[in-house]
Image (cartoon, rainbow, N blue to C red):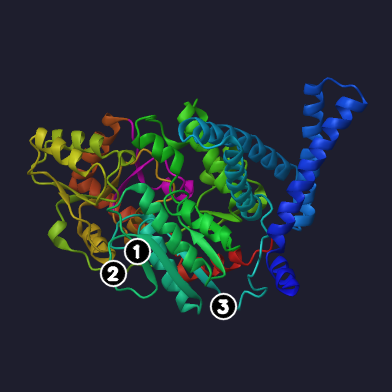
Amino acid sequence: MVAFIIKQIYKYKTFVKYIISGCLAGGTDLILLFVFTDIFGIWYLLSAVLAFILAFFVSFFLQKFWTFRDNNREKMFGQMKSYFIVCVINLGVNTVGMYILVDKFKVMYILAQIIMSGLIAISSFIIYRFFIFKKQKLILPNGENKKLKILIATGIYPPDIGGPATYAKKLSEELARLGHEIKIISYGECGGGEKNLYLIGRKTNIIFRYLKYFFQAYQLSGRVDLVYILDLMSAGLPATIAAKFKSRRVVFRTGGDFLWEKAFQSGWTDLPLRKYYESKHSGKEKLLLNLCRWLVNKIDLILFSSQLQAEIYRKYYGLPVNKIVIIYNASPALSEVKPDNNYNNSVVYAGRLVKLKNLERLINIFAKIDNKQTKLLIFGEGPEKNKLKILIKKLGADDKIIIKEKVEHKKLLEIISGSRFFILPSVTEISPNLALECIGLGQPIILTKETGLKSDLTNNLIKINPLSEDDIRDKINFLLKTDNLIKYRQELKNLKIGQREWKAVAIEHISAFNISR
């Protein structure tokens, strides 16, 4: 019996040490309160404050160095701050919980305190173990030639249209060709049939979606070396928490910008990305910004496709330079794309149908353009779809502006290649893959001037001020003139753009994954 008890204590030694440390800290608090008040004659409220402060340090150092054996002193002051915040929150939770149990459910106050103490002890243990004093198990191989097991967590995946969908598909294929084992988790409908692809349905409410994503990511994280997330919140939040529970490393590639996109979609701002971060924010926005900062702090390395966003994260999220890696997007050869000439008198947009894509302004402008032969085709899905359809009908432009269903990527490139020109009027595009593919095809494009692409590339493109209807209308009318279109197409074909294949992007990813922290 004694041997069994000893065995169980050893098995759960971390939790046992956690309880012992808590008891020692509590005992310290009571003893010091007595000493300060009865021996030194200090006013009892001041004694209570002094005793609490000293007991707090006893508790922190016991839990950090003895219970959880975290000997890292570099983050100690940050951990101490988090530890104190948890203590304050626990005080509030205990007070509210006691009130509910005693006054609402008529539980005896002693039993109520026992219940609350137990719940707070368990929740605090989880927070200390997996967040404040978490052990970072870097199980990444030392050599870049050793094969990795990687979980790619994304919010969208083909047949969805969008940068992260294309990126996840192309990068996973190239990493697999290099011999690495890839698993992918994404939101989407079941029945994709692709090996190692795990889809979470979108038809449930957001809480259940996030929970399903978390549990699936939690299961998969135990089978991989690292988790690579392609957005910060919808996929990033549940996947990062799951990865940390499994002590796996998390690498994040920025695509869009969650905070700005949320603010724009919610009507909190109409500013481009740069100006938004420079402006004043509401209480809701500050709360979300702090949540994003917390999440970014839990991520081990962040990959950026542009200096624009890297600078924003450094300045506004407090991201240290040693967590920043720049990996520019691929711009592969696309000579195998066959133009679909059925679209040679169409202007094409493709992407998510959300407010920041500036489609309402584009539709209002195109409806007034005096050109009955050319149509505007909008390919994609999103929350603004019905609203845009209603607007088109209201303007009486059903015959010249058509919203089409999303198509698979290869077919989309054929449509764009065969179209008159492609337009991307977004309020901001950080690093648009489709724009790069248009350039690779030598296909005319009208692009927002608010972009993170390199200036030596964008200087050769027709750019628009996304907030100026006059500028957008003038540039569209310019390319509706055949002579101007032919000249622009020839300039793009003569434009020398260094090809950047997906294999090079994949190799740079492996180098980044193997960065030792």
Q: Quick check: 105 left or right of 1?
A: left
Front residue (pair 239, 166): 239
The reply to whether dot 3 and dot 1 touch (C-beta < 8 Å) is: no
Residue at image position (31%, 30%) is: 468
Front residue (pair 170, 372): 170
Residue position for label 2? 192
Which comes sooner in the sequence, label 3 or label 1?
A: 3
Q: Position of residue 433 (x, y in %)?
A: 38, 56
Q: Circle 2: is it few (<14), some (14-19), or many (20+) Cα within 10 Å?
A: few
Q: Quick check: 190 left or right of 501?
A: left
Quadrant the N terminus occupies = bottom right
Front residue (pair 243, 128): 128
Identify the secondary structure beneath mark 2: loop
Identify the secondary structure beneath mark 3: loop
**Span colored in magenta:** 444-467
Disc 2 marks a residue whose amino acid type is: Gly
Residue at image position (50%, 25%) is: 280
Instruction: Let me know if residue 288 is in the magenta part.
Output: no
Q: Position of residue 408 (x, y in %)?
A: 25, 64
Residue position for label 3? 147
The reply to whether dot 2 and dot 1 touch (C-beta < 8 Å) is: yes
